[in-house]
Image (cartoon, rainbow, N blue to C red):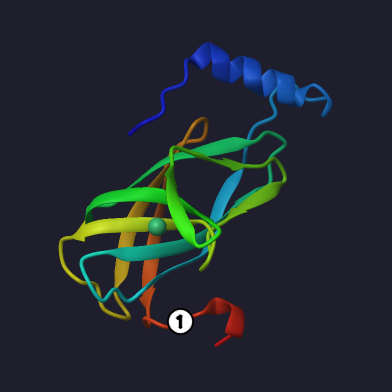
Amino acid sequence: MRHLVAPAAVIAGALALAGCGGSDDAKAELSVGSSYMPQPVSDMAAGFLTIANKGAAKDELTSVTSSAAGSVTVHRTVGQSMEEVKSLDVPARGQLVFKSGGNHLMFENLKHKPKQGEKVTVELHFAKSGPIKVEMPVKSATYNPATGH
Ligand SMILES: [Cu+2]
């Protein structure tokens, strides 16, 4: 489900955000790191990553696609349950973090069950920036980056 924004609205939004920065062409500068998928045990999988924005304008993650799955949706965790969201903000000079127990990507109807050591290609789509392709490594089912190696 793509979230289409009229180009005029995008430009107006960028200019408004640039107002206090002193630059007329402030834009998001996105990069992706720390991506991984815990090895799935069914035809569903979660995915985690961090989207950093060095730019002076915010952006929005609007959809995620992958040829490895029938569908990929963006979820956030609220209390004990999770809900699908249409988009998530990538703040200016900040980051959008997907991690276990928080925001996550949800892959459904996987075409095959990827194993540890494989990579799953996903494409991130944004309201303003061009799409970013990510090679998401598959880790063990219990992998947790917070505990280190
Ligand atoms: Cu979920």
Identify the residue shown where x is 80% and y is 21%: 19
The reply to whether the residue tagged 1 has its Cβ within 8 angstroms of ligand 1 is no
* Residue 43 visible at all: yes
Identify the residue shown where x is 49% and y is 31%: 127
Q: Amino acid at mark 1?
A: Tyr
Which structural element holds mark 1?
Answer: loop
Q: Nearer the viewer, residue 4 or 108?
A: 108
- Give coordinates of residue 42: x percent, y percent: 22, 71
* Residue 68 visible at all: no
* Residue at image mark 1: 143
Identify the residue shown where x is 31% and y is 50%: 72
Mark 1, Cα crowd under 10 Å, few <14 / some 14-19 / many 20+, is some
Identify the residue shown where x is 35% and y is 57%: 106
Q: Nearer the viewer, residue 9 or 105?
A: 105
- Give coordinates of residue 15: x percent, y percent: 70, 19
Quick check: 138 left or right of 49?
left
- Give coordinates of residue 148: x percent, y percent: 59, 85
